[in-house]
Image (cartoon, rainbow, N blue to C red):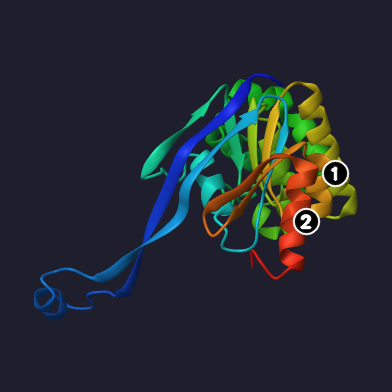
Amino acid sequence: MSEIAVRVDHVSKKFRLYHERNQSLKSAIMRGRRSVHEDFWALKDVNFEVPTGSTFGLIGSNGSGKSTLLKCLAKIYYPEKGSISYNGKIAALLEVGSGFHPELSGRENIFLNGSILGMTKKEVTRKFDEIVDFSGVEQFIDQPVKNYSSGMYVRLGFSIAINVNPDILVVDEVLAVGDAEFQEKCSQKFVDFKKDGKTVILVSHAMAAVREMCDHAAWLSHGELVAVGEAEPTIQAYLNSLNQGEGL
């Protein structure tokens, strides 16, 4: 636990909020081609380290910057200031099944999605049966995924991502998908990850799940880091702030 899996080094991320876009050539000329906007800093000088082999929770109210930080960790966004460094291979599960093609079968999408997540065809073939078994959609594996229920869709997406076998797995609200049985399988998979010395970083609004799974946590509020450290006291401080009407 002494090694560092991820180092978030004074990260700041901004977005432009446009009040009035140029809707025509005339308006562009009148404004000198500039649209009226202001900078919104979604993350402000966030700084912490994630220990190797830990399950690390990102907590905070809506609009606190959790999802923005998660997308920075997943290399979807890049910060304006600061940097993020990694010790190992990273995989992200932010929108389950986002790489699926609706017209292709579950079988074909396993190979497609697996390749998007960085697996070779040989690796996907080797893990194919395990992916299908974990997802529980074997009966429909040769049907187009557009005919899948939402539950089947997310189960298959998660099953593929979890089998990429990364050193660091970044997850957004994954415990909210599927039924209770599948959520239990997901939780057990995270336990297995930890036993293998893997690192999991997750965002969840379910404090009971974070409390159960995470040993470390970072609390964000309005883009700023409020607290970071062991999960239990960090979660409790966050919950206390909600009860006092703060951090909303």
Q: Is residue 178 left or right of residue 85?
A: right
**Badge 2: residue crowd in 10 Å (few <14, some 14–19, many ≥20):** few
Above or below, 21 relative to 65: below
Which residue is depicted at the point 27% across and 74% down? 21
Q: Which residue is mark 2?
A: 206
Which residue is depicted at the point 82% across and 46% down? 211
Marks 1 and 2 close (CB-CB < 8 Å): no
Horizontal and vertical percent for residue 173?
A: 70, 52
Q: Secondary structure at mark 2?
A: loop
Horizontal and vertical percent for residue 202?
A: 68, 44
Q: Which residue is mark 1?
A: 212
Horizontal and vertical percent for residue 226?
A: 60, 50
**Badge 1: residue crowd in 10 Å (few <14, some 14–19, many ≥20):** few
Above or below, 21 relative to 99: below
Mark number displayed over residue 5:
none
Q: Is residue 26 left or right of residue 127?
A: left
Q: For residue 129, which quarter of the picture?
A: top right
Of residues 212 and 117, which is closer to you in this image? 212
Q: Is residue 138 visible?
A: no
Which residue is depicted at the point 14% across and 74% down? 28
Instruction: Give the quadrant of the C terminus.
Output: bottom right
Q: At label 2, which amino acid type do we have?
A: Ala
Which residue is depicted at the point 85% across and 47% down? 182
Among numbered discs 1 and 2, the one appearing first in the sequence = 2
Q: At label 1, which amino acid type do we have?
A: Glu
Of residues 151 and 65, which is closer to you in this image? 65
Of residues 193 and 98, which is closer to you in this image? 193
Above or below, 85 relative to 72: above
